[in-house]
Image (cartoon, grey):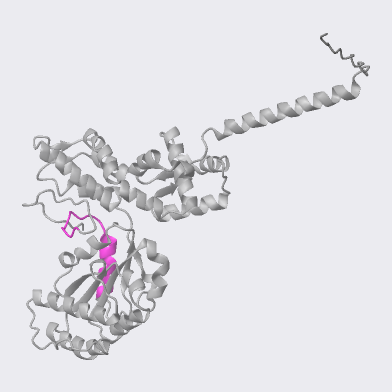
Amino acid sequence: MIYTTRMDDVINPYQPLSDDDSTPAPFAGRQAAFARLHQYLEEPTSHHALAFLGQHRGGKTALLRRFDTVYDPTFMGVHFPLRQSKHASEAELWTALVRASERTLAERDLTLTRLPMLPDSNDNLRDWLDQNWLPEVWTAIRPHRRLVWLLDDGHLLIDRLPPSVFASLHDLLNRHPQLKIVLTASLEDETSLPTMDPLVDLAQVFRLTHLSQDETAWLLQEPAKPLYTVSDSAAHEVYRATGGQPQLTQRFGYHIYNTWESDPSHTTITLEDVKALLHTMMQESRSDFLDLWQQSTPVERRVLTALSRLIYTDPLNPVDHQALMAWMIDSDNPLDSAAVNAGLRSLDYREIVRQEQGKITLTMGLMQLWLLDTTPMESQPAPDSTSRRRQLALVLLLVLLIVALLAISQLSGPEVAATPALPTATLAGG
């Protein structure tokens, strides 16, 4: 099943997904993620939080925002966007969680009169929540319901609070079976996840990837059906340009909608319509590609540069590993195969490149355009390095031949008599 929002009475429902935009947008895919979440919610004794890992602007927040539309009221999700909330102490976190939970319960028309008030002192606030507040919450919501804390950007807690907070949250899960915790974390902070032990079980982390080609087509076609159609070739071109990256796909949907809105009689979006938007998309996505570039290691940047040049040189044939290695070895600063392979594995994991049957491609065609347009020159291999090396070798060989010929001529040639010095005449005027 694929979930979406309705387009009724909405002006352009697609969203470019800016960081401060909380407007729901059409939503596709994530069936496996929702299935894993449902399994976690139904587990009677789960002592860990369920963590979803994904890239920045890769759909983590959108997933949590769909919680209430996907699951029945038995599961009461408390949305807690940590990026919008600053917590300098553990006590502030407990206070914020209590207040956010009470707002959610009030929206469900549950009676909260029996819930104890927050104490004036922050001392032992965690114990108060454990021993006083949560037991009354379970009475208010009855045994068949679950309270689910949805901690968006949960990795931010790592830098803000001491590691003991994760042990405290884990202990609450142990002591209160009706409490569940779901959090999202950035792929860039994956190496910091062990800090969340014992709250997060690394073996149970669920990674969100890009949308598939079918999911991308659904996102462009189904929500827009009452207004216009998007041809299969146009949807395929969007996927080729975005690689199914959620934000780029939403941005394309946004501009496709604007194309129809500017001429409502144009009810079929064609391949040519999509190609006409590529320049606008590339300009508006520059900051996204720059972020990916800056998050990459020097080796990964050189691999991306080489790959983009090889694709540009021969766009009809996918780049194979041998061609990429030849390019890297022949550059001014050659890299060995181990470094190149490590860079490729990392880029593949981050869904920037795709390796299939020995062929290497950039997942996002728009990034190919960005790399060709803006890659810093100092990161690029020197142009025509092969021919220049050959020219230098020929020049060196020619110099060696000349030196050798001069040496041979001096050793084997006839002796030449020394020419006596000519007398010097001095002219004097008298």
Left or right of 67: which side holds 189? right
**Residue 21 image position (x, y, % from top left):** 19, 58
User: For the view shown, which residue lies furthest in the top direction?
Assistant: 430
Residue 399 in view of the camera: yes
**Residue 317 image position (x, y, % from top left):** 44, 35
Query: Which image quarter is the C terminus in?
Result: top right
User: For the view shown, which residue lies furthest in the front direction?
Assistant: 430
Left or right of 333: which side holds 184? left
In the image, residue 384 sits, relative to residue 56, either above or below, namely above
Q: Is residue 26 magenta?
A: yes
- Along the viewing direction, whichever of 61 and 419 lies nearer the viewer: 419
Q: Which residue is drawn at the image coordinates 20% and 55% (left, top)?
A: 27
Query: Which segment did they paint magenta?
Result: 21-41
Q: Which residue is drawn at the image coordinates 67% and 28% (left, top)?
A: 394
- Along the viewing direction, whichever of 395 and 219 lies nearer the viewer: 395
Quarter assignment of residue 198: bottom left
- Count numbered badges in the picture: 0
- Along the viewing direction, whichever of 235 and 17 lies nearer the viewer: 17
**Residue 104 image position (x, y, % from top left):** 14, 74
Q: Is residue 272 magenta?
A: no
Query: Which image quarter is the N terminus in?
Result: bottom left
In the image, residue 397 sits, relative to residue 264, either above or below, namely above
Quarter assignment of residue 284: top left
Q: Which residue is drawn at the image coordinates 27% and 90% (left, top)?
A: 124
In the image, residue 7 sits, relative to residue 162, either above or below, namely above
Left or right of 372: which side holds 120? left
**Residue 334 image position (x, y, % from top left):** 57, 45
Residue 218 in view of the camera: no
Left or right of 385: which side holds 246? left
